[in-house]
């Protein structure tokens, strides 16, 4: 297959590395980035066969033979990017994306693609690291990680997108855009806000001696709890902006749970608190191996 990757950061670059290295099934990967240096670096590390800042620089014969185009831009740029490059691609090409929200993307993207007799299937590979950019790209980033693919009446397109992610080692799940957004709000988007709030609460400590001591004593527990709150600010904002209702729902549920814990501590209900913690200890296994 010939694959296009638009957005050569961690996800796009890692996808290209795996596709070009995995098998002869992916015999060509072209890439687009806004930054000329990123294009050069992507070619140097063999994340793409060819890269450019302008799709017009990709040979017409390659564009005509492209099977799938993966949009790996920030959420806000997904729809504008599809609108920009769709007219330059052949009919029947399949677009997919890597956005962490789906309800705001799937239907509008499908409408854009249908104007050019093209196809769209939403997807969300749930993999990453704390690093960004093409030089953070790595082989096997997607191995044994989950990926959501949204359903469509175009079963062939769904199967091709599913096969693409399976070819780089992902475990693919199919669900509606709404179900996806509610699920990721619980386990990904709300935790970013909660983690960031923990960091802000610590920084709000007025006793600077205590704050300095806390900074010196912080170890694995704080590091693990605060990790996602110290991530990409733009991505965090876009999660909340494009998945507002689901994020608010999850945060309000968390707020109620936290208030219940505060009540247990205020009322010195130590046995009830221990029971609560025993339940969460057991329940964590449902989410983390």
Image: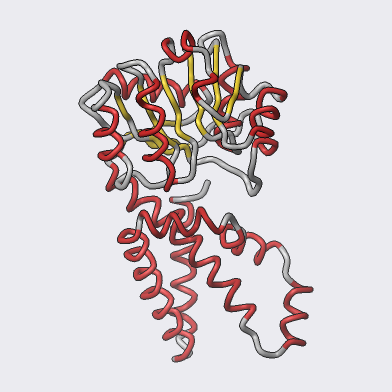
x and y percent of residue 87 in the render? 35, 24
Relative to 92, is 131 above or below? below
Counting the numbered discs, the total is 0
Relative to 168, is 192 above or below? below
What residue is at 40 percent from the left and 69 percent from the top?
254
What residue is at 48 percent from the left and 56 percent from the top?
284
What residue is at 77 percent from the left and 80 percent from the top?
213
x and y percent of residue 24 in the render? 56, 8
**Which colour scheme appears in the figure?**
secondary structure
Q: Nearer the viewer, residue 4 or 208?
A: 4
Left or right: 101, with 45 as reference point = left
What residue is at 52 percent from the left and 13 percent from the top?
59
Relative to 38, is 186 above or below? below
x and y percent of residue 268 in the render? 48, 90
Left or right: 31, with 136 as reference point = left
Q: Nearer the viewer, residue 96 or 271?
A: 96
Relative to 64, is 70 above or below? below
Identify the residue at the far left of this view. Answer: 153
x and y percent of residue 246 in the render? 32, 58
Q: Nearer the viewer, residue 155 or 67?
A: 67
């Amino acid at each position: 297959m010939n694959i296009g990757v638009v957005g050569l950061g961690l996800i796009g670059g890692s996808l290209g590395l795996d596709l070009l290295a995995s098998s002869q099934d992916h015999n060509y990967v072209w890439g687009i980035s806004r930054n000329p240096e990123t294009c050069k670096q992507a070619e140097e590390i063999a994340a793409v066969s060819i890269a450019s800042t302008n799709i017009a620089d990709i040979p017409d014969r390659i564009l005509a033979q492209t099977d799938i185009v993966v949009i790996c831009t920030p959420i806000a740029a997904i729809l504008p990017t599809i609108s920009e490059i769709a007219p330059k691609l052949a009919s029947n090409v399949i677009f997919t994306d890597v956005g962490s929200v789906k309800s705001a993307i799937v239907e509008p993207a499908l409408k854009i693609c249908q104007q050019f007799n093209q196809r769209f299937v939403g997807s969300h590979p749930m993999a990453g690291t704390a690093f960004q950019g093409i030089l953070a790209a790595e082989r096997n980033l997607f191995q044994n990680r989950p990926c959501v693919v949204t359903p469509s009446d175009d079963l062939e397109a769904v199967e091709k997108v599913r096969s693409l992610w399976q070819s780089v080692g992902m475990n693919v799940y199919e669900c509606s855009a709404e179900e996806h957004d509610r699920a990721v709000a619980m386990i990904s988007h709300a935790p970013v806000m909660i983690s960031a709030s923990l960091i802000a609460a610590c920084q709000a400590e007025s006793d600077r001696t205590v704050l300095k001591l806390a900074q010196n004593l912080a170890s694995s527990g704080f590091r693990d709890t605060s990790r996602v709150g110290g991530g990409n600010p733009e991505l965090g904002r876009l999660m909340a902006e494009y998945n507002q209702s689901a994020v608010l729902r999850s945060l309000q549920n968390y707020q109620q749970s936290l208030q219940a814990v505060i009540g247990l501590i205020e009322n010195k209900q130590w046995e009830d608190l221990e029971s609560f913690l025993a339940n969460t200890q057991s329940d964590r296994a449902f989410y983390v191996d």
